Image: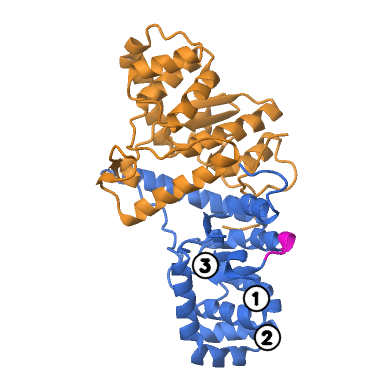
Amino acid sequence: MSGSRAAPAFPERFARLRGDARIAVYIDLKSPYAYLAIGPTRDLCRRLDVAIDWRPFTLDIPSYLGSARLAKDGKTVESSQRSNEQWSGVRYAYRDARRYARLRDLTIRGTVKIWDSSLAGIAMLWAKRRGALDRFLDEAYPPFWRRELDIEDASVLEAVLARAEIDATGFRDWARGEGRQLHDRSNAEAFDAGVYGVPTYLVEDEVWFGREHLPRIEWILLGRAGRAPEVANRSFRR
Amino acid sequence: MTGGATSASERLTIALDLRSPFSYLALRPSFELVDETGVEVEWLPVRALTLSPPSRPGPGDDRGVRHRRYRAEMLAREIEVYAAAQGLTIEGPYRDGGADAVHLAWLWLRDGAPARFRAFLEEAFGRYWSRKLDPEQLDDVSALLDELALDGARFRHWADRDGPAALSASQARAAELGLLQAPAYRWQGELFLGRQHLPMLRWLLSGRSGEVPI
């Protein structure tokens, strides 16, 4: 690793995964960091007049962070297969997400369990096919993070689609068949390429995990002019 | 740097580990933050977990193993790209061993010659990541201090006599503050892991004025 080198080579598979989109962003409803990233990502891309290809990526949290479930009071740990280090990391992540959320009047409550958000991912694909994914995200993220949505319940997701003014007729059947297959295939393709968390950004040949890389993504989208910026959780609202 | 009239809660604590490439990446931006805000800082050397290289793919790899490999690959890319952006040389981000001799000089200068502290830290990080400094050898670190027109012999005397206690107190202080990773920042009881929080710290230190971090 040397400061004299130009941009390093990113594996070609990331550019292939991005496809025709100028920027593709993987998100999951159950990730507070994905929630926090949506606003600034939109601000940046609106300013640069770049369309965002949002893609659902259902995190398999127990595979890397252990599993846990809280009791109904939302505070007591009912069951846990997490190490102290994993707990410490999870607690810090929520504290961190909350302090940024507060600055934007967003509510992030701790979850009581690790949700299977695949059905929500399928609903994202349903909304995306109807050109209304942004509306769906706006109707789904805030109530989910206020603990008002059971995202494993198809009827709850149908109601979210309805609030986003998206016709949900046939959603349930689609979610059991073609939608599920599409979701699982897209998830597997992303993971096989090396996407492991959200938000993950694909832009040109580069891949980045976390909204702190938005300054670099802006720099890339603007043609890499001038000095490459540092990582920073900063605003893109102008 | 460690202002006598400033209470601990008004000081920003910055925890770095010489052996952490992310600490090296945070060094210059952290000094810039200090320069811009004029905040009193307690610079704390810590022993963070060192990075592990990505594992080699194997036929029995489960999702967790692959996840950790992808994460390690992403971190390696991040180090390479952002080191290049800052014009830094990072030769081999995966290092074993300690850094006690450098961390001792860090404490000695921080408390005894704060005006020269920054120059030493920049030089020590630069040489270590170019493989030109053994951070466990007191002789090497004393020689570096001499090169910087500091008193290597005096440091050596202090390190032999008071060093172990100073290092131990410093490690206890890091543990007490929950600063076990690097780079990490602590301001008014709040912990921030990683240099991506510098805009937030800048905003807090400026009385919550200016651009709001996201």
Disc 2 crowd rating (10 Å Cα; few below 14, some 14-19, many 20+) is: some
Residue B40 percent coordinates (x, y)? 66, 68
- Which residue position holds label 3? B17
Q: Amino acid at mark 2?
A: Leu
Q: Amino acid at mark 3?
A: Asp
- Which residue position holds label 2? B150
Q: CA distance from mark 2 to mark 3?
A: 22 Å
SS under mark 2: loop
Q: Taken as a whole, is the magenta stretch helix, strand or loop?
A: helix
First-in-chain label (2 vs 3): 3
Q: Quadrant of the C terminus of chain A?
A: top right
Res. A40 image quadrant: top right
Residue A154 percent coordinates (x, y)? 34, 17
First-in-chain label (1 vs 2): 1
Whether A78 is among the magenta residues is: no
**Residue found 49% across the figure and 29% down from its top:** A142
Answer whether labels 1 and 2 touch (C-beta < 8 Å). Answer: yes
Whether B38 is among the magenta residues is: yes
Residue A180 percent coordinates (x, y)? 34, 19
Answer whether labels 3 and 1 touch (C-beta < 8 Å). Answer: no
Answer whether labels 2 and 3 touch (C-beta < 8 Å). Answer: no
Residue range highlighted in magenta = B35-39
Closest to the observer, A77 or B144: A77
The letter of the blue chain is B
The answer to whether residue B114 shows anywhere in this view is yes
| Up/down of A232 relative to A221, above or below | below
Q: CA distance from mark 1 to mark 2?
A: 9 Å
The answer to whether residue A126 shows anywhere in this view is no
- Which residue position holds label 1? B120
Q: Amino acid at mark 1?
A: Phe
